[in-house]
Amino acid sequence: MTTVTQHSTVTDFEDNDRKPVGHGRMLRKEDPRFVRGKGRYVDDVQLPGMLHLAILRSPMAHARIVSVDTSLAEAHPKVKLVVTGAMLAEKNLAWMPTLSNDVQAVLATDKVRFQGQEVAFVVAEDRYAARDALELIDIEYEPLDPVVDVRTALSPDAPVIRDDIEGKSDNHCFDWETGDADATDAVFARADVVVSEDIVYPRVHPAPMETCGAVADYDAVDGRLTLWSTTQAPHAHRTLYAIVAGLPEHKIRVISPDIGGGFGNKVPIYPGYVCAIVGSLLLGKPVKWMEDRSENLTSTGFARDYVMRGEIAATSDGRILAIRTHVLADHGAFNGTAAPVKYPAGFFGVFTGSYDIEAAHCKMTAVYTNKAPGGVAYACSFRITEAVYLVERMVNVLAYDLDMDPVALRMKNFIRPEQFPYKTKTGWVYDSGDYEPTMKLATELVGYDQLRAEQAEKRARGELMGIGVAFFTEAVGAGPRKDMDILGLGMADGCELRVHPTGKAVVRLSVQSQGQGHETTFAQIVAEELGIPPEDIDVVHGDTDQTPFGLGTYGSRSTPVSGAAAALVARKVRDKAKIIASGMLEVSVADLEWSKGSFHVTGDPTASVTIQDIAMRAHGAADLPEGIEGGLEAQICYNPENLTYPHGAYICVVDIDPGTAVVKVRRFVAVDDCGTRINPMIIEGQVHGGLTDGVGMALMEMISFDEDGNCLGGSLMDYLIPTALEVPDWETGFTVTPSPHHPIGAKGVGESATVGSPPAVVNAVVDALKPYNVRHADMPLTPSRVWEAMNGQATPPI
Ligand code: PCD
Ligand SMILES: [Cu+]
């Protein structure tokens, strides 16, 4: 893929006098092992005497369990253990808490609530025998009417899915509201123009390359449990295992080795992990569980599934005054949302987008349906994907009705640079931003005016070409801990740094890389602060025995939270190094100056000691300054004062074949602003991946169900994910607006492109269909949906 990197007028870390962080565009340290097939994933873990676990899943979406007969499976010569929900219930383990204060069945006891739900498990000598034995388990189900359509889930005659919750008489999950209803209604009442549209963000799946799995190894002699698992949050998982299973936390070690993509899919605790632990506890042997692709697609956390009504009030010349929305959220059979406790709808509250408006209001109702549980963050920064899609689609609807250019309309309404920090009408404080240069750069890179001219010519010839514009602001880096917690665990992250006598260092993180390159970028951050080359700094993560406590990686929080921790812990070490240097140079601390890797005496650059010299002295035989302990190390826990707010401007160009309604993405320009850029190449990789994701969601992906609640997206034959063939050569650019509160000014970027690209693609398709008077069409814009839109048919309900 080609990348056009254009530099902006804003401070640019790469080219201006300011130096790159670490070595800037440094090659990824982890790649030599990945490209040589030497990565070590959970499925690579092989232990002596290891047994294999397979899970029996419900064939039905909603059914009462009448009887369970496991005798034939138990008689299988290679089977060691068969466990049912009833057996777990005896040990009080049939239900577990979700990350959003709901409970979820580990194995079904009373009834099954979605197709693919865990009903029983078998542990056998090998994976084949375990799978074979599943077929020997005889379960009698009494089918119940399923609740599939989110729109009718609350109707009085709908069957109650969650009758396990005492007193529950409907499928209501939660209500949530933000903004000011009265103020918003008042603005709407006096506005020249009101536009509204029904917008669906369909259910999609993160579909990481590696499915979920675990190896549990319980040692009955010393009471220690080691769990290798595909988790993006090893420490949080460990604490929950300690609470759920009643095991002492210090006896549990969670190791999350290399992960083949997470994308939010590996944030929740899945029944399979708990089953593996139970299997190992009962048998005293290591037990491995690995999902297959269908299990991953049908039973692990999905994302989105929001049915939204968007409304904008504006003046007739395009000044946006207020935004109002109603959302119906489908959470499936159990609320498995991974979001901070006080944010049941994640950070959807940023649906006011990048615009300076007078009022906003959102009312949301979430319901249970007979579908896989979830609402996980899939590259969404906690539901910001849905929020950005809503507002960016609605702004285009307004542009359509007012016949205004979508770039001009956005420019007119942007929050202005002098308004930052900007408090939105839903209470978010955007730390910084400078939107106009970013939008301008995107239009320049794509050649916006020429494209509009080309489009006009093509329209005259009956050809369908569309230009889609989207602009986003994200809120990433959850904390601070007083506002944000997961099941009571505050969102802050630890970091430890140790410099060895020879000046090599090791930094230990509480966050977890799933492919985004932390081993490289965190070494670069420490390198920048301490002057030790990034090659000499090892990054340790993904092992609770070796790293400090922290809440893990999701919502693009590693750089904003742990990245800050890494910079600050390095500064702490540097402060100590300075005192040691003052002893070595026999001057006072006040007379020392730091320049990239060494301290020198003010006015005499030749009187200097390097950080490596200092490290040796710190561990040496010579006396250290009064009160200074030997060694050169520090640790901190960083509690962010606010989130960071990256932004970006995306422009997509599509061509549609009027005969087949096939959409081709011809060009895509993405200009991102994530503040200080640690590793530009990694950022581009993150953006390329996210854009590909976005094209997939906009044009191809959807987990759909038939009226019986059968999942129709259970394999990659049906659930289409994009490949290099479906996407153009990405063109990227950037601006740099540093975060004022982050120690190095960096903002997160991992999810930006997935958040920003779907509205750009959809806006492009809808723009191409202007000759057909299409104002909106729902994702995924498959040829049949585009064809329906061209022929004036509404998109079918999900
Ligand atoms: N300024 C800046 C920022 C950033 N960076 C870089 O980049 C990356 C990213 O980051 P961030 O933004 O911080 O993020 P994180 O936290 O690290 O991560 C996370 C994300 O990440 C992304 N990306 C990726 N990649 C890969 N390869 N794989 C994966 O899986 C993934 N996933 C996805 C998701 S979905 Mo969620 O979970 O839904 O919530 S969230 C998410 C890293 O490496 C870092 O360091 C730089 O350089 N600079
Ligand atoms: Cu996310």
Image: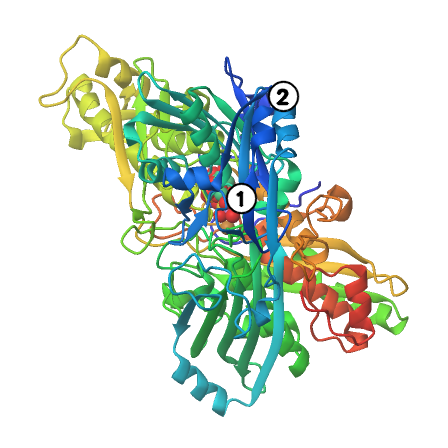
Question: Would you identify the image quadrant in which residue 427 lies?
Answer: bottom left
Please name which of the two marks, 1 or 2, marks the residue nearer to the observer. Answer: 1
User: Mark 1 packing: few (<14 Cα in 10 Å), some, or many (20+)?
Assistant: many
The three-letter amino acid code for the residue at tag 1 is Asn
Q: Which residue is identified by label 2?
A: 37
Q: Where is residue 208 in the image (x, y as percent from the top left)?
A: 60, 40
Residue in the picture at 38% in, 65% down: 167
Q: Say which quadrant the N terminus sits in.
A: top right
Query: Residue at horizontal 77%, vertical 65%?
Result: 785
Does the rendering let one see residue 180? yes
Quadrant holding the C terminus: bottom right
Element at label 1: loop
In the rendered image, residue 791, in percent from the top left (x then y), is placed at 83, 74
Q: Residue at x 74, y 74 (%)?
A: 794
Label 2 CB less than 8 angstroms from ligand 1: no
Q: In this view, does 694 lie above or below 357?
A: above
Circle number at residue 265? 1
